[in-house]
Every structure is written in structure tokens, then in C-alpha cells.
Amino acid sequence: MLALSRKANESIIIGNDIEVTILEIKGEQVKIGINAPKSVPVYREEVYAQIKEANKEAASDTVQESLKNLFKK
């Protein structure tokens, strides 16, 4: 992991087209802005974990349903 120090209104660039800017610092909370192409999904970690879990459950359900249909014949 790369650890960087930034002040308010300073940025880092990821790749050629993603910019992360420190917008505001209040106590222990940091507000960041992310400028990325629309084709790059950006999620909070807890939301991403929920999406991954939902996808895993959906895939499991699909596999189970396919197996049920296979053995019905």
C-alpha cells in the first residue's frame, strides 16, 4: 500500500484519468472528491462488500436452479 500525506485542495492521480482530491478536513473526518471516467465504478467499501455478497448469492441461486432444471428431465 502506498501511503501519502495530502492537505486540503491537494490531489493524487491514479493512472492517467483518475484524480482524488482532498476537499476538506474536519477533526478525524476527511472529505474527498473523486474524478474518474463514467466507465470506472467508484463505491464506498461497505457498499462494495454488499454488492459482492449479493452477486455471490445470485450466482449461487442461479447454479442451484440450473442443477434442479437439469435433473428434472
Image: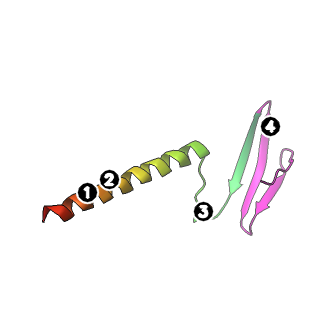
On screen, residue 72 above or below 46:
below
Residue in front for this viewpoint, 67 or 23: 67
Say which label, 3 or 4, has the lower sequence index: 4
Say which label, 4 or 1, has the lower sequence index: 4
- Mark nearest the camera among 2 and 4 is 2
Check residue 14 in the rendering and tell me which mark sits there, or answer none. none
Check residue 61 in the rendering and tell me which mark sits there, or answer none. 2
**Cα distance in 3D space between marks 1 and 3:** 32 Å
On screen, residue 2 above or below 40:
above
Residue type for callout 3: Val
Residue at the image position 18 percent from the left and 62 percent from the top = 71
User: SS at mark 3?
Assistant: loop
Residue type for callout 2: Asp
Residue at the image position 86 percent from the left and 48 percent from the top = 6
**Cα distance in 3D space between marks 4 and 1:** 50 Å
User: SS at mark 2?
Assistant: helix
- Mark nearest the camera among 4 and 1 is 1
- Magenta residues, as a range? 1-28
**Location of residue 13 in the rendering, given as x and y in whole percent from the top left corner:** 78, 61
Q: Is residue 10 left or right of residue 34?
A: right
Are dots 2 and 4 in contact, CB under 8 Å? no
User: SS at mark 1?
Assistant: helix
On screen, residue 70 above or below 21:
below
Is residue 17 within the magenta segment? yes
Check residue 25 in the rendering and tell me which mark sits there, or answer none. 4
Residue in front for this viewpoint, 49 or 24: 49
Is the residue marked by circle 3 packed among few (<14), some (14-19), or many (20+) residues within 10 Å?
Answer: few
**Location of residue 2 in the rendering, given as x and y in whole percent from the top left corner:** 81, 54
Are dots 3 and 4 in contact, CB under 8 Å? no
Looking at the rendered image, the quarter that the C terminus falls into is: bottom left
Residue type for callout 1: Glu
